[in-house]
Structure formats: structure tokens, C-alpha cells
Image: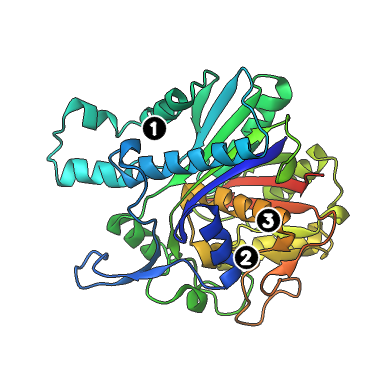
Amino acid sequence: MTITGIGAVTGYGWGTPPLWDGLLSGKPAARLVAGFGRSSEENVWLARISDDGDPCDGLSRFARAMRGAAREAITDAAARGWRPGRRVGLLHAVVISEVQGWRDFYLKDAAHRRIRDYLTLMPSTPVSMLMQEYDFHGPAMNVSAMCSSGNAGLITAKMWLDSGFVDDVVFVSTDLSLTPENVEHFVRLGVGVVDTEPLDACRPFQEGSRGFPAGEAAISFVLSQRTDRAYVRVLGGDMTHDAHHLTSVDPARTQVDLCVLNALHAANTSVDEVTYLNAHGPGTQQCDTAEAGLVDDVLHGRPGIYSIKQMVGHCQGAAAAVELAAAALGYAHHVVPAPPTVAPGHRRLLDGPTPMRAGAVTLKTSLGMGGHNSAVVLAPAA
């Protein structure tokens, strides 16, 4: 399976060019947002999506970003020679949909709306509208695995394609959940950091890291086995669950390691063939310790490590997808979009954009809250 089209809406702007340019700039997408905190006097750092897009795509930023990203991916794939097969499926990776819409429904609308406007809050609505727009008739469903949802959706799409269940898949991962209440609770959990510029606080695999900035994203891929101008091949993947704790990674790392080994086996790739680890890397001590241990113990200390959480923010349900998009764009540009390092860190940590080695294999890990482990293996398209 290959990624043959990409669409992106992030804190950097609408479209993949702003995402790529932002990553190479070394400057985080987060900006100081005035009056966003629970107190009207409070200002916080957020990588929040702007209120743009096509108003015809829906009432909310969520609907407009979801459909905008999907439309860009489909247009991009068509420009690369892709033509939809007879049966095109849609997978939408999402954890909490229409957060702002539901907040307004209860707090501003007193739980009363016109029926048509109420239906826009349903998770089926943007999916249905996208299927109608393109006259797609394959299966359409949502996938949810917390921060691993992007990887989970990609793996599900590969199963659909490998089994012949569909001819192509349009995959979208959307998370626009930055309300004052949600941001506050991640700060209270001790992992979200919004009181300072991201590079000061989020330092994956480096000293002095306090956690992650909050971000939003809508990412889309066209996935196919019938294209000659793809960005990257998806060789295989795997998912496991720690069954350990509501928020913490199992320090034994048993299921994390098993997930990676299973993914490499599915991809017919050895541990020593992994060139780069595109890490979950949220800048929290427990996640950084787990993935650093994975590199040292399982991957024999060989791959270069990078995480883009400090750049795009932690995009929750869309986190893995935006990180996969960064990796895929990196293959197209032959550059690993690593952020600059700002403090002493792991010896294999990449420092800034790095020329990509020929034939590089990238392992993309994601450790979703609650124990959702996932890994996807990427390789050059040709």
C-alpha cells in the first residue's frame, strides 16, 4: 500500500506547503492566544487551526478542516495520476468529534437547535457529506484509538486493501478539541504545557522537558495499491494494548516492544534495517524513557530519533497522522523534518532537518493514552 495523496490543516495553516515550510523553519506552530484560558485574563500557547476553510463544508472548524484536508489529498492524488477504483472506502480517525460544536450546543444554544444544525454534530455527517461529494460507495467508518488513531486507521486501511475489500481508501484523521476545558485538564494531568513557548517546555528525548504543547490537525491520505507516483510505501504495522493504566505507559515495555517487533515482522523488515524512528515523543518522562529504551534495547541503538510534537503540538486523535504526514513529505523532499535540539539529549537524536539516507526505512510509533500501542513501517515508494 502507498500514500499517493496528502492533505493537511494544522496550526501552520491550511495545506501541506505551510506544514512542510513550518517544519523546516524550526519555529513551532503554536502562538500566544489571548483570553483563551478559563479566566478571560489568561493567555496560553496553542497550535490552533485558524477559522478558515469553505463555509459550504459545514458550520464548524471541525467539519471544514476535515473536508478541506480530504479534498486536498484527493486533488493531490489525482494530479499524481490516481483514479478512483470501483470501490473507494473512507476511514475517519477521530477521538472526540465536534468538541466546539457540542460546547456551543449546551452552553450557548441551551440544547436547542434546528434539526439540520443539530445533525451537523453527528460524527456521521462530515463522513456522509464527503462520500456524497465524490460519489464514493465503499465502506465508511470511524476509527478511534486515542493518540494512536492515525496509525490504527492506516493499519486498518492496509487490511482493507490487502484483502481486496476495497480498491482505494481515503483516510482522514481530525482533532480540533482545544477548548479551554480540555486544555485545562491536560495541564492538570501534568502533561500539557501552555504557559511558555513550546521549545522552552517540550524537548523530546532532551533534558528539561516538561510535557507537550496543545495542537490541532486534520490530515488526509489517499491510500492505494494502484499508483506510480506515490510519496511512500506502508510496509506493515501492528497494534497492542498494555492493559496497565489509564494514563501511564507500562514501564516493563512488554507490549510496546512486541508491537514494534510484530510490525517489523509484518513488514518483512529486520530491526537493523530501521533507519529512523519517528517517535510519539510527547516530551513526557515516561514516554521518552520508553521509546529511548526501545531504540537502545530492541533496535540496537541504530536509528536516528525525532519527534515533531514541539512543532505541531500534540494533536491528540490526529497526532500520529500529522507525524506520518511529516514523514511522508520527508520522503518526497529527501529530508527528515527533525526539529532543532535545544538541550543535551539522547545520542541518536537528530538535530534539525537532516538529509534522508537512500533507501531509508522509518518506524513510526505512537503510544496512545490508556495503553494503545501502535507501530507502522514506511519505506521509499520506489
> What amino acid is at disc 3?
Ala
Provide residue 157's location: percent of width, then percent of height.
63, 31
Circle 3 residues within 10 Å: few <14, some 14–19, many ≥20 = few
> What amino acid is at disc 1?
Pro
Return the disc, 1 or 3, that comes first in the chain's sequence: 1
Return the disc, 2 or 1, that comes first in the chain's sequence: 1
Q: Which residue is drawn at 80% across and 61% down?
A: 297
Mark yes or no: residue 144 visible.
Answer: no
Q: Which mark is residue 126?
A: 1
Q: Residue at x 75, y 53 (%)?
A: 362
Seen as rendered, the residue at the extreme bottom is 343
Q: Which mark is residue 252?
A: 3
Q: Which residue is drawn at 52% across and 50% down?
A: 245
Q: In this view, does 35 lie above or below 224?
A: below
Q: Which of 266 and 92 is in front in this view?
A: 92
For marks 3 and 2, give the one nearer the viewer: 2
**Quarter of the picture holding the C terminus:** top right
Provide residue 321's location: percent of width, then percent of height.
57, 48
Provide residue 101's location: percent of width, then percent of height.
27, 42
Q: Which mark is residue 288?
A: 2
Q: Nearer the viewer, residue 65 or 257?
A: 65
For marks 1 and 3, give the one nearer the viewer: 1
For marks 2 and 1, give the one nearer the viewer: 1
Return the disc, 3 or 2, that comes first in the chain's sequence: 3
Name the image quarter holding residue 139: top right
For numbered disc 3, what is the local secondary structure? loop
